[in-house]
Image (tube, grey):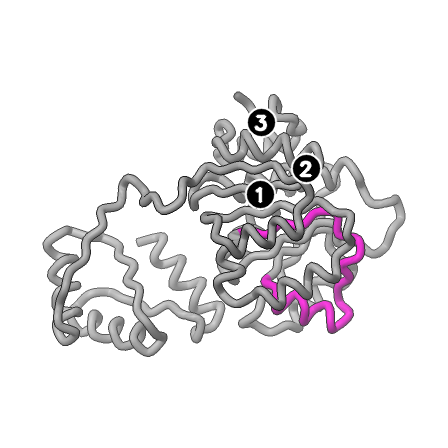
Amino acid sequence: MSFVSLGLAPDLAQAASALGFAEPTPIQREAIPAVLRGADLLATAPTGSGKTAAYALPVLQRLLQCPAPAGERLRRTRALVLVPTRELAAQVAALLGELARTLPQAPRVVVAVGGVSINPQLMALRGGAEVVVATPGRLLDVVRHNALRLGDVQQLVLDEADRLLELGFAEELAEVLSLLPPQRQSLFFSATFPPSVQALARERLREPLRVDLAPPNQPVGSITQRAIAVDAARRTQLLRHLMQAEGWERVLVFVASQYAADHLARKLHQGDVFATSFHGGLSQGARQQTLREFKER
């Protein structure tokens, strides 16, 4: 099955192919035709399933099918993507930008996220943007600065809707939704389907197509889970032993606080293990550098 057979325009299908999308993944096969039809969508799909492209491609196509009037000076925001973290916002915007780069009328994509200065984002929004990728709190900040209007939004995407609600964005999310026009297409993508997401879907979606590609409470097949009881004072020693005995080349270690992350990284460094802490107290530049170094081994 090809992207064109799903209804995608040849230009976008070619852009997807250039980025290495050989053929549609299951979530893309289900989501793309539904989005192109204008249907609301509630999709449950695991990380790595291609869900970002599943909405990015049809959202871009619908923008191309309804171009802004010729001579319009201010680009109206017609697609809004809400995400829970700065890193995900950067990834989504990068994919949208890559897919749109070769299009005849490429829409402008702007990112608005917290944790960094708002001024560059306000400057980026001068002249408007057809697509905005944002975290809820910073989006509201930008709106309060009169740098963005949401009255023309035709498509709303909640990427990782479960995390948006789990991380305490419920009130901000409700405020954002109140600023959007009632007649719009809404697309919810979530790794899980907890009661909070179910309630939001019932309230905000209109007869949505339900796509469930992530059975609940099922661990990924390639992951082995173990629970090891160990005294607190010997945890770091055990971690180093496991890394050496198992031959782990890259390790993600989750801890309870920013202090614990910094403390553990220092202790591992003292044992000749290259470790870096990663948490919300770091600058965006430091976070991006850490992710880049981890990805590049």
Label placed on residue 39: 2
Q: Distance between the Cα atoms at labels 2 and 1?
A: 10 Å
Label 3 or label 1, whichever comes before in sequence order: 3
Label placed on residue 209: none
- Total number of numbered labels? 3
Q: Which residue corresponds to mark 1?
A: 42
Mark 3, other Cα within 10 Å: few <14 / some 14–19 / many ≥20: many
Q: Which residue corresponds to mark 3?
A: 3
Question: Under tag 3, what secondary structure?
Answer: loop
**Rendering coords of residue 10 (x, y %):** 65, 27
| 30 vs 262: above or below | above
Q: Residue at x 61, y 25 (%)?
A: 6
Mark 1, other Cα within 10 Å: few <14 / some 14–19 / many ≥20: many
Q: Distance between the Cα atoms at labels 2 and 3?
A: 18 Å
Reply yes or no: does residue 154 show up in magenta: yes
The reply to whether discs 2 and 1 touch (Cβ–Cβ < 8 Å) is no
Label 2 or label 3, whichever comes before in sequence order: 3
Q: Residue at x 66, y 46 (%)?
A: 205
Q: Amino acid at mark 2?
A: Ala
Segment colored magenta: 135-159
Q: Distance between the Cα atoms at labels 3 and 1?
A: 21 Å
Q: Residue furthest right?
A: 71
Q: Amino acid at mark 1?
A: Leu
**Rendering coords of residue 275 (x, y %):** 27, 66
| 39 vs 196: above or below | above
| Left or right, residue 127 beside residue 79 | right
Q: Residue at x 54, y 41 (%)?
A: 43
Question: Under tag 2, what secondary structure?
Answer: loop
Disc 3 vs disc 1: which is toward the camera?
1
Reply yes or no: does residue 143 show up in magenta: yes
